[in-house]
Image: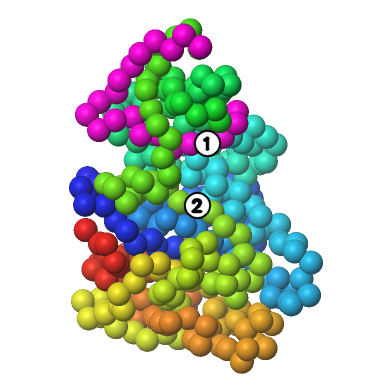
Amino acid sequence: EPSTSGRAYTLAIAVPGSVIEAAPSAEAAAVIAGQIARAACIFNVDEVVVYDDSAAAGSTTNDGTITVATATLARLLQYLETPPWLRAALMPGASAYPELRAADAMCSSLNSPHHTRGQEWRPYQEGVVMRSEPGMGSFVDVGSDRNAHVSQDLPTGRRVTLHLGDSGPTASFVPAFSETMLQARVVAPSEPRTRLGQHWGFSVRVARGLSKVVKEAPHKGGYDLTIGTSEQGVAREQSELVLPRFKRALVVFGGVQGLEEIAENDEALAQAGKSATDALSMYLNCVPGQGCTSIRTEDAVLVCCAYLHAAIQKYGHGAA
């Protein structure tokens, strides 16, 4: 159940696009993305960064292109994060992508609060603007038997987060649209988190190279805690793990190449004389004594987020 005190801090994870490069089929790629998306929801991840870990992306002369695998993984994560009833309106060309068709067939529901359809009452709901009338507001499809009405004139097709009231819905007849509608107001997508402590999905960002994962942070002041995960990192018992107090945390995962090799191929880091351990504020081995020779990234996301979960909650500013 969500906290009533809210959560001020945010958690981001960064995964390399190469994680699906060797996937033998669209179905396999979808399953890998589904595992990452599911872990992100379980452990309250607010942002997933997909970074291109190819040598070309790490070059300072990169022309802005990214690998097909990076684009595909980002597209899959965006699709899976989108509430199912909004996908047709927000991603109308989805059927043209075999990996997105595979996601519909192969991936389990995220069971995230923002995926709850309107029939189950929650104070907040995701929706898509279906129609606007100048000076009359907009009507929004929220997956309910009734559409919602907001006072702003919004662009058709825009995804919005709505507050429908804390004690239950209020419906009234809206002459401009000739129907009885739920009364709502548009809020920031972060409000369910900051006000109720409720996880409300994750944004997806693409970065061209490891250095830009940190450099292009969407927050003013960037991330104040960055954690690299590697077999070469410091091993600590979960109960003994201490983190600095933080507001914006980022956990970075390697791929087929470890973070060490990825950092070596990043020209911006190389020119600054920085290794992976220098570029990040902490470098941890979350699975000391692992039984296999390497851990797949999609498994590492689940295992490492579980290892860090209690400490993230304890040391995050504004933690409930």
User: Which mark is drawn over residue 203?
Assistant: 2
Say which residue appears at 33% left-offset and 16% top-offset.
171
The answer to whether residue 206 is seen in the rendering is yes
Q: Is residue 163 located in the magenta-colored stretch of the structure? A: yes
- The amino acid pointed to by label 2 is Ser
Q: Sequence order check: which comes first, mark 2 or mark 1?
A: 1
Q: Quadrant of the C terminus?
A: bottom left
Q: Is residue 177 located in the magenta-colored stretch of the structure? A: no
Instruction: From the viewer's perspective, tell me whether residue 147 is left or right of residue 105.
Output: left
Residue 161: horizontal and vertical position, in percent? 43, 37
Closer-to-camera residue (245/32): 245
Say which residue appears at 21% left-offset and 52% top-offset.
5
Q: Name, please, the residue furthest toward the bottom.
A: 273
* Magenta range: 155-176
Label 2 vs label 1, nearer the camera: 1
Say which residue appears at 33% left-offset and 45% top-offset.
192
User: Which mark is drawn over residue 159?
Assistant: 1
Instruction: From the viewer's perspective, tell me whether residue 179 is left or right of residue 262.
Output: left
Q: Residues within 10 Å of mark 1 (few under 14, many from 20)?
A: some
Secondary structure under the numbered disc 1 in the rendered image: strand
Q: Which quadrant of the structure image shows residue 121?
A: top left
User: Which mark is drawn over residue 308?
Assistant: none
